[in-house]
Image: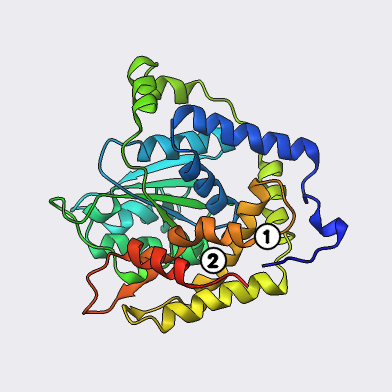
Amino acid sequence: MSVSLATSAAQSPLDPGLHRALEAAVAQVNGVVLGKAAQVKLAFACFLAGGHLLIEDLPGVGKTTLAHALAATLDLRFSRIQFTADLLPSDIIGVGIYERGDGAFKFHPGPLFAQLVLADEINRATPKAQSALLEAMAEHQVTADGATHALPEPFFVVATQNPLDLAGTFALPDSQLDRFMLRIGLDYPDRDAERALLTASDRRELIAQLAPRLDTAQVAALRESVARVLASASLIDYVQALLAASRNHAEIRVGLSPRAGLALLQAARAHALLEGRGYGLPEDVQAVFVAIAAHRLIPAAASGAARDELARRLLAQVPVR
């Protein structure tokens, strides 16, 4: 695919100082979450694109560490919610408590009122508790006792999920999976990264020593810059071809929605920004596609393929023109 660009559009939409700060932020998180540069870049792309992140993997591979490192590096107010089978929606959102002095109920915000919310082991909670996140993730607000309460900005949910074959898990419904812009896995570290982990300081000590690399104004500027990354007509054609192919694939019962297409384009723009470019390329779409698409695809009954494998096949079958 050829992308025709004007010189001004080809330049990075970031000033050099902001771009250096972004690179320093990514490098700092990579210094804590070792050997996972691709996943760290996807996490940053998700945040810059204004989405929410689902991390699915076995316990103990660094899911929570990644969330803590992002919050410390981006200077975001952090809150952790441990999802358990007895968790109630009010434990997440908050609750109205009667104030005798005022003679009225006063809303007391729950742990959801933070800038980076870690929903830890989200699929250990019942569907009723899981659904408490839906309005927050979609609208950046919650409704309690008939009143609407705005959540802080930026608002970024990082949810961790254990594989469904582990005991004590409840599958997230497809409607909630769709609210996560990206789903990634960390997997086991390679030999060198694991040795560095075994010989280095405790991850909690490292996180406690992290200094913010971006402030609130810089984060807002970066998010605004994503919208200025050029997506050419040919790049949008490529995105549409992927969407259409997902809806006409013999092994896929439910393909990608227009919302998924918007997420794909926005995440590709954020990936281009992280690469220092002011324009998107097919490589940006390809870099984020599996993380965007796999958890949204519903395989046909006759298909024995996992969702990730279906997404990879789909990407390989759609040519770049």
Camera-side residue of 14 and 9: 9
Q: Tell me the colour scheme of the image.
A: rainbow
Residue nearest the viewer, comparing 5 with 298: 5
Could you classify mark 1 by the number of other residues whose Cα lies within 10 Å: few (under 14), some (14-19), or many (20 or more)? many
| Residue 167 as seen in the image, left or right of residue 248 | left
> In the image, residue 32 lies at what x, y percent?
46, 28
Considering the image in quadrants, where does the C terminus appear?
Answer: bottom right
Q: Amino acid at mark 1?
A: Gly
Instruction: Look at 72% across and 40% down and name the residue there.
Output: 19
Element under disc 2: helix
Categorize mark 2 by other alpha carbons within 10 Å: few (<14), some (14-19), many (20+): many
Numbered badge on residue 280? 1
Where residue 15 sits, quadrant-wise, is top right
Residue at the (25%, 43%) spot, across then down: 58
* Vertical arrangement, residue 225 with respect to residue 148, above or below: above
Residue 126's x, y, as percent?
Answer: 22, 60
Closer to the camera in the image, 120 or 90: 120
Indicate left or right for 249 with 14 as reference: left
